[in-house]
């Protein structure tokens, strides 16, 4: 994966000015609340249009202010996992997952449904409605739905922030499995350093709308974090 960002964006008094290249497979955007991490994620998803700059994913230009290029969200093939699962309450787990498959349409690569269900350990949950799921179970289903979209890129915006320490520890191994099993890059936002040091291959520290540091995380370092 190669995600090139050269973004200038201002919202009120907040000024985002970021230039970097993400190489993955899991790239973590780390920093305090209000640093600009989620804003960057929304720009990647096409949910927010920056005022200037350029964005390219694997050489495909999604935004270029000078050339007046803006690829809309539905053409970017992004899987987005939010802080809350945001599952459809009137659908059971299987139907929520199938929504991801439907959204994928006729993509060149289809992620196998049964493999995703097995990987995330959600087969016993398929007939349940979201209200009957724990927070951790909802997040696993949300991750599965994002995967089944056969996305080019998965964005995770503080997906474990609403969970307690025990539930976070339960979910992190599933994210590690995604990194190891599927060739789908992930951009992961968090303000918890223990999370990103465990799962990320590179950590980008953002403060006040600026990149403060970029560092690679070795497998050996990840192995001793937890």
Image: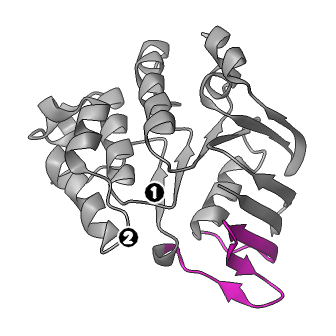
Range covered by the magenta-colored residues: 48-73
Residue 175 is tagged as none
Q: Position of residue 183 (x, y in %)?
A: 50, 48
- Quarter of the picture holding the C terminus: top right
Task: State if disc 1 and disc 2 touch (CB < 8 Å).
Answer: no
Coloured how? one colour
At 70% from the left and 87% from the top, the residue drawn is 69
Q: What residue is rendered at 49% in x and 77% in y?
A: 75
**What residue occupies the far left of the structure in this picture?**
127
Q: Is residue 53 magenta?
A: yes
Judged left or right of residue 6, residue 223 is left
Q: Is residue 73 above or below residue 70?
A: above
- Label 2: state its secondary structure: loop
Residue 162 visible in image: no
Closest to the observer, 9 or 175: 175
From the top left corner, tell me how far across and down residue 26 is, in percent. Answer: 62, 40
- First of labels 2, 1 by sequence position: 1
In depth, the one of 12 and 50 nearer the eye is 50
Is residue 21 in view from this perspective? yes
The residue singled out by tag 1 in the image is: 79
Q: Which of the numbered marks, if any, corresponds to residue 108? A: 2
SS for tag 1?
strand
The crowd level at tag 1 (other Cα within 10 Å; few <14, some 14-19, many 20+) is many
The residue sitting at 59% across, 71% down in the picture is: 46
In the image, what residue occupies the spot 36% across and 60% down?
A: 149
Q: Position of residue 29 (x, y in %)?
A: 71, 42
Which residue occupies the foreground of this view, 226 or 127? Answer: 226
Q: How many marks?
A: 2
């Amino acid at each position: 994966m190669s995600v090139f960002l050269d973004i200038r964006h201002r919202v009120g008094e907040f000024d985002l000015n970021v230039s970097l290249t993400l190489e993955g497979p899991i790239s973590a955007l780390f920093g305090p609340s209000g640093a600009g991490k989620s804003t960057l994620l929304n720009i990647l998803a096409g949910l927010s249009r920056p005022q200037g700059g350029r964005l390219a994913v694997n050489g495909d230009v999604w935004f270029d202010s000078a050339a007046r290029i803006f690829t809309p969200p539905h053409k970017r093939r992004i899987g987005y996992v939010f802080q809350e699962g945001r599952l459809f309450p009137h659908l059971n787990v299987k139907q929520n997952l199938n929504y991801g498959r439907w959204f994928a349409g006729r993509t060149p690569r289809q992620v196998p449904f049964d493999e995703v269900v097995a990987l995330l350990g959600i087969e016993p949950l398929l007939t349940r409605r979201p209200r009957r799921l724990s927070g951790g179970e909802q997040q696993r289903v949300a991750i599965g739905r994002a995967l089944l979209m056969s996305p080019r890129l998965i964005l995770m915006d503080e997906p474990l922030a609403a969970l307690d320490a025990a539930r976070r520890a339960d979910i992190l191994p599933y994210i590690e499995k995604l990194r190891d099993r599927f060739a789908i890059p992930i951009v992961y936002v968090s303000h918890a350093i223990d999370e990103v040091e465990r799962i990320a291959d590179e950590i980008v520290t953002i403060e006040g709308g600026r990149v403060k540091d970029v560092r690679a995380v070795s497998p050996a370092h990840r192995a001793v974090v937890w």
